Amino acid sequence: TFALLAPDESLLGFVLRYLRYATVSAWIGGIAPLLFVRFGLANAASTLVDQPELATTT
């Protein structure tokens, strides 16, 4: 994907790969859920501290 900018096994190639994975991780871990809640596509998650009955098992 960044092969036009730098070979995969060069320092620049490794840096670009790191940035790509960091961007995807930030999107999956925080940005997308925040936008889903903000636009009303999902509800904010409740923690088990707020609802201890969910923590019990049968």
Image: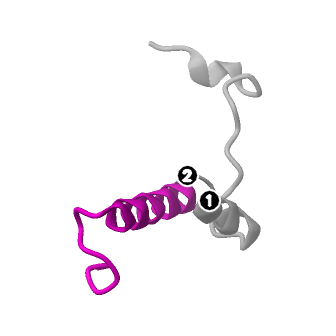
Identity of the amino acid at label 1?
Answer: Pro
Question: How many circles with numbers are drawn on the protein?
Answer: 2
Instruction: Give the residue displayed 49% in from the left and 57% down from the top.
Output: 22
In the picture provided, is 25 more to the left or to the right than 55? left
Badges 1 and 2: C-beta atoms under 8 Å apart? yes
Q: Residue furthest bottom?
A: 4
Circle 2 residues within 10 Å: few <14, some 14–19, many ≥20: few
Residue 47's image quarter?
top right
On the image, the x and y values in percent for residue 41 come to 63, 69
In the picture provided, is 12 more to the left or to the right than 37? left
The quadrant of the rendering that contains the N terminus is bottom left
In the picture provided, is 54 more to the left or to the right than 22? right
Circle 1 residues within 10 Å: few <14, some 14–19, many ≥20: some
Of residues 35 and 26, which is closer to you in this image?
Answer: 26
The secondary element bearing badge 1 is classed as helix
On the image, the x and y values in percent for residue 15 come to 42, 61
Magenta region, residue range:
1-28
- Which colouring convention does the figure follow? one colour
Q: Residue furthest front?
A: 11
Residue 3's image quarter?
bottom left
Of residues 30 and 42, which is closer to you in this image?
Answer: 30
Q: Which residue is mark 1?
A: 33
Identity of the amino acid at label 2?
Answer: Gly
Q: In front: mark 1 or mark 2?
A: 2
On the image, the x and y values in percent for residue 37 come to 70, 62
In the picture provided, is 15 more to the left or to the right than 47? left
**Residue 55 has which mark?**
none
2 is within the stretch colored magenta: yes
Predominant SS along the magenta part: helix
- Distance of label 1 from label 2 (alpha carbons): 7 Å
Q: Which residue is mark 2?
A: 29
